[in-house]
């Protein structure tokens, strides 16, 4: 498929590195977290339809949505542990269009389900563990052996759908510092580590980690409201300048953090404008907005 999206540099290919896949199983798991909550009540509260039980139907909807926005590819993240079957069914419905990412709780991880998964997604603060715990080591070993991706959420973590539903989120930010990945990334040179949202408040630490570990990438996704926590409250232009100075254009991955409400075109417009205004070349724009993700998922 050859889809090109208008940009300040002219038409370019876009591959979104961060899209949440809301399956029927996710709604079922959320409903189990609060007495009296149902799948239909969740849909009503967040203003979305109940996801079809067949994940392929959700994939068809995402394919149509991306077509509408001229987006060529996307990494779809199964947003609850153990939902590999859903994400693989979605990927298989549109071969070559999507990349399978799946949330992992290392306390109950089965590598047999990950033969065709591109990335294991860790949320240490959500599941309350340190990346140095022994139970996490098999995930890193799997990624290193198979040349796969480990996506590690660091920094501030808030799950909007949980907040809307009044589901408690007893997360623990003690486990959110990107620096914790330093020794691990060095020990697993054949794995690719992705820290989303520029570190989500740990921007300095994320840059330090990436500077020391060439297998660490940052994704640019979400509104990046974490900049409020920085002393100088930097805008996106400043953030991108700093990130480019440390990582260069080859280790930045464009992402939106889109979910049930559809593809967030505003994020693309804001980020492409900021990068263009700081003088990013067209070739470097192609790397950030598409080529880098295609390269690391092809390994």
Image (spheres, helix red, strand yellow):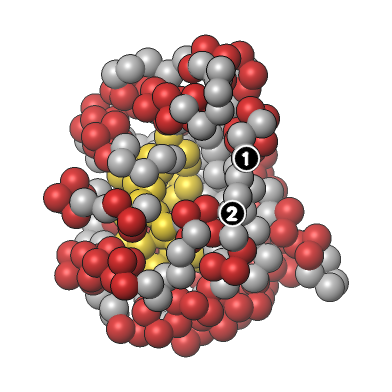
Is 141 in front, or is 286?
A: 141
- Tell me residue 234's x, y (percent): 79, 67
Report which quarter residue 84 is drawn in: top left
- Tell me residue 249's x, y (percent): 50, 70
**In the depicted structure, whether residue 265 falls above or below residue 254:** above
- Is residue 144 in sight in this rendering? yes
Q: Residue at x 35, y 51 (%)?
A: 104
Q: Which mark is residue 171?
A: 2
How many C-alpha atoms fall within 10 Å of the one at disc 2: few (<14), some, or many (≥20)?
some
- The residue furthest front is 35
Q: Which mark is residue 168?
A: 1
- Tell me residue 18's x, y (percent): 48, 47
**In the depicted structure, whether residue 209 falls above or below residue 42:** below
**In the depicted structure, whether residue 219 falls above or below residue 11:** below
Quarter of the image for the C terminus: give it: bottom left
Q: Residue at x 28, y 64 (%)?
A: 139
- Tell me residue 109's x, y (percent): 27, 53
Q: Residue at x 47, y 39 (%)?
A: 20
Q: Residue at x 52, y 12 (%)?
A: 40
Cα separation, mark 1 vs mark 2, equals 9 Å
- The residue furthest right is 232
Please tell me whether mark 2 sits on a helix, a strand or a loop: loop
Query: On the picture, is 157 further left or further right than 4?
Result: right
- Is residue 286 in sight in this rendering? no
Is 50 in front, or is 17?
A: 50
How many C-alpha atoms fall within 10 Å of the one at disc 1: few (<14), some, or many (≥20)?
few
Please tell me whether mark 1 sits on a helix, a strand or a loop: loop
The reply to whether dot 1 and dot 2 touch (C-beta < 8 Å) is no
């Amino acid at each position: 498929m050859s889809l090109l999206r208008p940009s300040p540099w002219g038409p370019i290919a876009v591959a979104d590195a961060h899209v949440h896949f809301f399956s029927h199983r996710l709604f079922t798991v959320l409903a189990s977290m609060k007495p009296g909550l149902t799948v239909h009540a969740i849909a009503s509260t967040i203003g979305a339809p109940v996801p079809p039980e067949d994940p392929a139907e959700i994939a068809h909807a995402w394919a149509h949505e991306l077509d509408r926005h001229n987006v060529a590819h996307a990494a779809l993240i199964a947003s609850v542990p153990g939902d590999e079957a859903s994400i693989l069914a979605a990927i298989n419905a549109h071969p070559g269009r999507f990349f399978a990412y799946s949330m992992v709780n290392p306390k109950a991880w089965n590598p047999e389900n990950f033969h065709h998964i591109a990335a294991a997604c860790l949320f240490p603060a959500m599941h309350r563990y340190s990346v140095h715990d022994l139970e996490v080591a098999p995930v890193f070993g799997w990624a290193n052996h198979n040349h796969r991706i480990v996506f590690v959420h660091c920094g501030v973590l808030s799950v909007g759908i949980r907040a809307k539903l009044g589901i408690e989120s007893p997360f623990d930010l003690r486990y959110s510092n990107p620096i914790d990945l330093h020794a691990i990334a060095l020990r697993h040179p054949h794995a690719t580590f992705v820290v989303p949202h520029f570190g989500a408040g740990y921007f300095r630490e994320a840059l330090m980690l990436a500077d020391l570990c060439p297998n660490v990438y940052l994704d640019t996704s979400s509104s990046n409201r974490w900049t409020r926590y920085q002393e100088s409250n930097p805008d996106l232009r400043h953030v991108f300048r700093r990130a480019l100075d440390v990582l260069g254009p080859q280790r930045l991955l464009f992402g939106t953090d889109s979910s049930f409400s559809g593809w967030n075109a505003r994020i693309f417009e804001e980020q492409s404008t900021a990068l263009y205004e700081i003088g990013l070349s067209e070739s470097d724009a192609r790397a950030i907005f598409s080529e880098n993700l295609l390269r690391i998922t092809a390994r």
